[in-house]
Image (tube, rainbow, N blue to C red):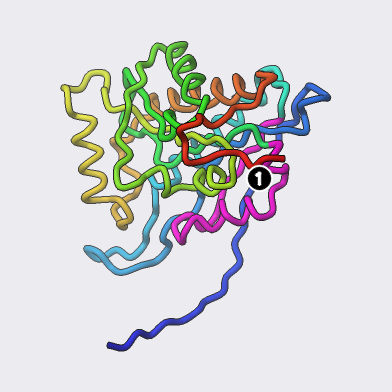
């Protein structure tokens, strides 16, 4: 057996923006909202197409983070700062998230939480919403209360194929920062029962990491707006709470002791 390998060095950037907090005691701390901006670029040809656009994974997340940032600037500033980070090279092994953790703009000990947006809802309004990591930290109860304020039911979503460990919130969690990855709901308004799960399976089978993950005329954004509102509400609730979120004792993650 012979294995041929090559090392290719490239430079790519995380893109960050900070909304300063209003409280002099807490403004040095931050809540992060993250979404990776990269996809696969040019790859193997599939049905005559070699451009891997990544419309859902993760241009949709970037659109959501921009929507959250715009909404935040139109609301009263929270006590803690909000840091928006569009990470690079997630598809190459969470490299952008890992690079941020190694060289954070705000010390990780002063980072209250990370809310991640990776593949957001482009199929319409839902009656529910979910998040990976809810059972690991006190962020879960915050998320449930926020979803209730948006008249959304929180459904426990299975951690399919170790999803919690496969997006940019994971390097933060491993370094001790409580994290959620906010996921679309599956109970779609005006659709039969099971339609949302069927569409998710179809995406995973036919478009995930394929050139066919591209813009479609059928995209609907009211569900994405729901996710943005929940993200903004959750970030503000964390940012205005004097207490820092914490991992539950049963979690495999914990903040390092000072």
Residue drawn 66% across the image and 45% down it: 16
Q: Is residue 84 magenta?
A: yes
Dividing the picture into quarters, in which one does residue 224 lie? top left
Q: Which residues are magenta?
A: 81-110
Percent position of residue 110, x then y: 71, 36
Left or right: 213, with 88 as reference point: left
Dividing the picture into quarters, in which one does residue 127 lie? top left
Q: Is residue 75 magenta?
A: no
User: Quadrant of the image for the N terminus?
Assistant: bottom left
Dividing the picture into quarters, in which one does residue 83 lie? top right
**Residue sitting nearer the eye, 165 or 6:** 165
Residue drawn 22% across the image and 33% down it: 197
Percent position of residue 18, x then y: 71, 37
Label 1 element class:
strand
Percent position of residue 38, x then y: 49, 54
Task: Check disc 1: other Cα within 10 Å, few if <14, some if 14-19, many if 20+.
Answer: some
Left or right: 21, with 4 as reference point: right
**Residue sitting nearer the eye, 170 or 54:** 170
Residue bearing mark 1: 16
User: Quadrant of the image for the C terminus?
Assistant: top right
């Amino acid at each position: 057996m012979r294995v041929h390998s090559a090392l290719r060095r490239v430079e790519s950037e995380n893109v960050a923006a900070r909304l300063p907090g209003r409280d002099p005691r807490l403004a040095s701390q931050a809540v992060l909202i993250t979404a990776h901006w990269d996809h696969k670029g040019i790859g193997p040809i599939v049905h005559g197409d070699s451009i891997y656009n990544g419309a859902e994974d993760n241009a949709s997340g970037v659109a959501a983070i921009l929507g959250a940032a715009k909404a935040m600037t139109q609301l009263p500033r929270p006590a803690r700062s909000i840091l928006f980070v569009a990470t690079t090279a997630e598809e190459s092994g969470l490299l952008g998230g890992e690079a941020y953790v190694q060289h954070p703009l705000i010390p990780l000990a002063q980072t209250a939480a990370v809310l991640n947006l990776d593949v957001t809802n482009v199929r319409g309004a839902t009656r529910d919403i979910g998040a990976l990591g809810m059972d690991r930290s006190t962020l879960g109860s915050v998320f449930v209360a926020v979803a209730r304020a948006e008249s959304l039911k929180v459904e426990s979503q299975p951690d399919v194929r170790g999803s919690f460990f496969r997006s940019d919130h994971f390097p933060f969690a491993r370094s001790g920062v409580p994290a959620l990855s906010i996921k679309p709901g599956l109970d779609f308004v005006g659709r039969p029962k099971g339609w949302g799960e069927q569409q998710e399976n179809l995406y995973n089978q036919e478009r995930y990491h394929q050139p066919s993950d591209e813009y479609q005329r059928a995209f609907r954004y009211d569900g994405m707006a729901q996710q943005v509102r929940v993200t903004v509400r959750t970030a503000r609730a964390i940012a205005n709470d004097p207490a820092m979120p914490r991992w539950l004792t049963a979690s495999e993650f914990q903040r390092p002791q000072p």
